[in-house]
Amino acid sequence: MERDELKAWLRLSLSPGIGNISARKLLTAFGLPQAVFEQPTSALQQVANATQLQSLRSEPATLAPLLETTWAWLNQSDDKCVRHQVVTLGDAGYPQALLSMDDPPLMLYLLGAAHFGVNPVPELGQPTSSASCLAPEQWLIDPDHCLAIVGSRNPTPQGARNARLFAKALVQAGLTVVSGLALGVDGAAHEGALEGLSDGDNDQVATLAVIGTGLDRVYPRAHHGLAHRIAQHGLLLSEYPLGTPPLNANFPKRNRLIAGLCRGTLVVEAAMQSGSLISARLTAEQGKEVFAIPGSIHAAQSRGCHALIKQGAKLVESAQDILEELQGFGTRTASSQVSAADAQTTGTDGAPESDRLLLQAMGFDPVGLDALQGRTQLETADLQAQLMTLELNGQVGRLPGGLFQRMAGI
């Protein structure tokens, strides 16, 4: 992209009163942004209202500094395999899956080794290939091979584990996992997707993160390292200009992109007011598959999933349930074949008899220390010591409120 072309796209995106829908009408009427700004007032009046017309006639004050920042970012080359890209609504490489939306973003900022559509043209200072990088055609993101995994920012230990293990199995089956880089389920899903790449296996896009800030920022900060690994084995995507801070309104809005870029959405854990339900609703409205993992009837984090299942989402107990619904996947690995019945015995084979009995007494619902004492008749000190051992072994998770929960496999 030439500098003047970038300037025109940025100017259109920054113009007050010109949202994605209005901008698309202008582009449909006049072509590229450069042509929009060259139109006489009489022509623009046919498409824009008086406020928009005035906005189009003057450059935003923030345009010049943003142009400098974006141009420098595009020409940055920190990693020979990671590209900095800006894809506009007029580019052949713009994700086709988003074009059917009412308000597709004018511009998408991309950071990573992967890309959409046609092979990207490298920006200045960025090599086309390297002996350690895959050829561009191997890094193509196909929305038909993408599945979103979303859920609570404060999941139970089992919820985080479910997100990680489902993501791992789905990537091993050939899918790309899409999520939002948030704390909780999102982060666990990205981590699991990266784990799904076997040793030395670098021939597929593991994961795509759709973020709610500018790509020059990582939010939350705790995911800085995770974002770097995603860029190396997938892609980070944002519709927001560089420098955009984490604003509350931007995160629900980006959910439409997560839904639009995927063949379906898996909700791992969600309260009734969770933003994950927005992604699920948008997925269903697009005629795509919604999957939900059931949980305890006593857990607030499961109520959103149970509501989705009542509304027609497919209840899933294993990754194989998803693969069978999507069809055409599941032949690359046997790891996705593990069923819920198998998961219930995970961690008990070969365990000491005392641990096995305690795990059976716990069941799979959250349980307090007093209730466990009543079931096992163990002394408090002995029970706490045994729980600590099981927690260190990853067989039991500690929940808020002094509760414990058995950790199942997938």
Image (cartoon, rainbow, N blue to C red):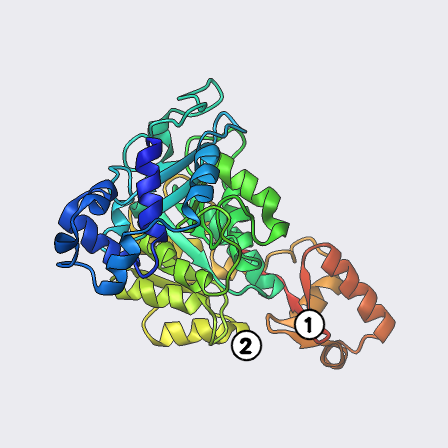
Q: Secondary structure at mark 1?
A: loop
Residue 300 image label: 2
Residue contact at pointers 2 and 1, CB within 8 angstroms: no
Tell me if residue 373 comes above or below residue 222 in the rendering: below
Residue located farthest toward the top when viewing the structure as drawn: 131
Name the residue nearer the viewer: 10 or 196: 10
Q: Which residue lies at the image location 40% right of the left edge and 27% below the top edge?
A: 123
- Mark 1 nearby-residue class (10 Å; few <14, some 14–19, many ≥20): few
Name the residue nearer the viewer: 45 or 340: 45
Horizontally, residue 296 falls left or right of residue 290, namely: right
Q: Which image quarter: residue 104? A: bottom left
Q: Which residue is mark 1?
A: 400
Q: Which residue lies at the image location 36% right of the left edge and 30% below the top edge?
A: 138
Q: Earlier in the sequence, mark 2 or mark 1?
A: 2
Residue 275 image label: none
Q: Does residue 315 appear in this view?
A: no
Q: Does residue 298 appear in this view?
A: yes
- Mark 2 nearby-residue class (10 Å; few <14, some 14–19, many ≥20): some
The percent position of residue 392, horizontal first and vertical second, equals: 74, 56
Residue type pointed to by label 1: Pro
Horizontally, residue 222 falls left or right of residue 48, namely: right
Horizontally, residue 386 falls left or right of residue 20, namely: right
Q: Secondary structure at mark 2?
A: helix
Horizontally, residue 30 falls left or right of residue 373, namely: left
Residue type pointed to by label 2: Ala
Q: Which residue lies at the image location 44% right of the left edge and 56% below the top edge?
A: 149
The percent position of residue 401, horizontal first and vertical second, equals: 70, 76
Tell me if residue 252 comes above or below residue 115 in the rendering: below
For the N terminus, which image quadrant?
Answer: top left
The percent position of residue 331, horizontal first and vertical second, equals: 36, 41
The percent position of residue 154, horizontal first and vertical second, equals: 59, 66
